[in-house]
Image (cartoon, rainbow, N blue to C red):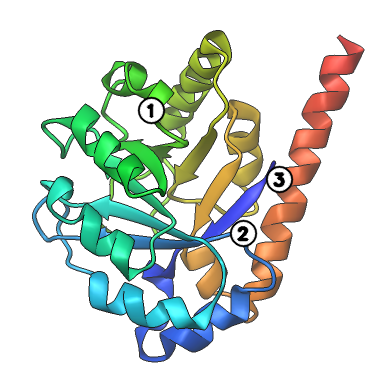
């Protein structure tokens, strides 16, 4: 199922609640990029902001922890309203334990990899997660162009998930627009994080609709091709 997750990293922080309400009727979840200035260059949102904007929407909060030692902050983000917490394989020394910690809080767990990180970094924890996030840009900044080579990792993860008989979402984050989302769909992704494309538009809600329509068209085209073959 296609899911669109606008990233509030590209929203106007001065009117964040209003920005979130503007996409609430169109999006499937709200993507919250948490940066520590160490794992990635910038510092962004934390638990207090997450807690405050929880009041602005009923959409699930997809909290992406781009921070070292994420295990120290799982409980506080869960308390702040996270519905999904995704941690980076590169940032957690004891990844298995961290994913267990997320699950023990009764929320969904995700694992992420950067563009240069091999798929084998997450292969042995796929059975523990609800979502795998493949970064299609180097994390830390919004508005970057997609690293299309990273889509080969989406394809590899898709094959692994099918081989293992797992049921999980495959998310891509970075450079998602109406021109790139089709390639991500064809690679096997079903959850799409979009920041500047959505919040840089005159009507963010309409931008979400465009992404969904384009993704669904790509998925339909794939199904038709498979039936033909």
**Can you tell which quarter of the image residue 13 is in?**
bottom left
Mark 3 or 1: in front is: 1
Q: Residue at x 23, y 28 (%)?
A: 96
Q: Residue furthest right?
A: 228
Name the residue carrying label 3. 215
Tell me if 108 is positioned left or right of 4 in this view: left
Say which of 138 and 106 sits in front.
106
Q: Give the secondary structure at mark 3.
A: helix
Which one is earlier in the sequence, the residue at label 2 or at label 3?
2
- Which residue position is annotated with label 1? 128
**Which residue appears at 18% of the width and 34% of the height?**
90
**Residue 180 x, y percent position in the rendering:** 59, 45
Res. 198 image quadrant: bottom right
Please tell me whether residue 10 is drawn above or below residue 212 in the rendered image: below
Mark 1 is surrounded, within 10 Å at the Cα level, by few (under 14), some (14 to 19) or many (20 or more) other residues, namely some
Q: CA distance from mark 3 to mark 1?
A: 27 Å
Residue 221 pos. (x, y %): 82, 31
- Left or right of 13 on screen, residue 209: right
One can see residue 142 in this view: no
Is 124 displayed left or right of 148 in the figure? left
Few, some or many residues within 10 Å of mark 2 (<14, 14–19, 20+): many
For label 1, the SS is helix
Which disc, if any, is residue 28? 2
Asked where in the image residue 46 lies, by quadrant, the reply is bottom left
Secondary structure beneath disc 2? loop
Q: Residue 33's x, y, as percent? A: 33, 60
């Amino acid at each position: 199922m296609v899911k669109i997750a606008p990233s509030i990293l590209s929203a106007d922080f001065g009117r964040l609640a209003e920005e979130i309400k503007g996409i609430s009727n169109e999006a499937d979840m709200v993507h919250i990029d948490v940066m520590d200035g160490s794992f990635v260059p910038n510092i962004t949102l934390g638990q207090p902001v997450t807690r405050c904007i929880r009041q602005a929407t009923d959409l699930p909060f997809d909290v992406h922890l781009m921070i070292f030692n994420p295990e120290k902050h799982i409980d506080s983000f869960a308390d702040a309203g996270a519905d999904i917490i995704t941690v980076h394989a590169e940032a957690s020394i004891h990844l298995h334990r961290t994913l267990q910690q997320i699950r023990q809080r009764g929320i969904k767990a995700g694992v992420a990899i950067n563009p240069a990180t091999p798929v084998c970094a997450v292969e042995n924890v796929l059975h523990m997660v609800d979502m795998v996030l493949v970064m299609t840009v180097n994390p830390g900044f919004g508005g970057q162009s997609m690293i299309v080579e990273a889509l080969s990792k989406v394809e590899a993860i898709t094959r692994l998930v099918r081989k293992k008989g797992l049921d999980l979402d495959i998310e891509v984050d970075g450079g998602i627009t109406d021109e790139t989302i089709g390639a991500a769909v064809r690679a096997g992704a079903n959850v799409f994080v979009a920041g500047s494309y959505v919040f840089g538009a005159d009507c963010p809600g309409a931008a979400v609709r465009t992404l969904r329509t384009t993704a669904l068209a790509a998925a339909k085209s794939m199904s038709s091709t498979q039936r033909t073959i």
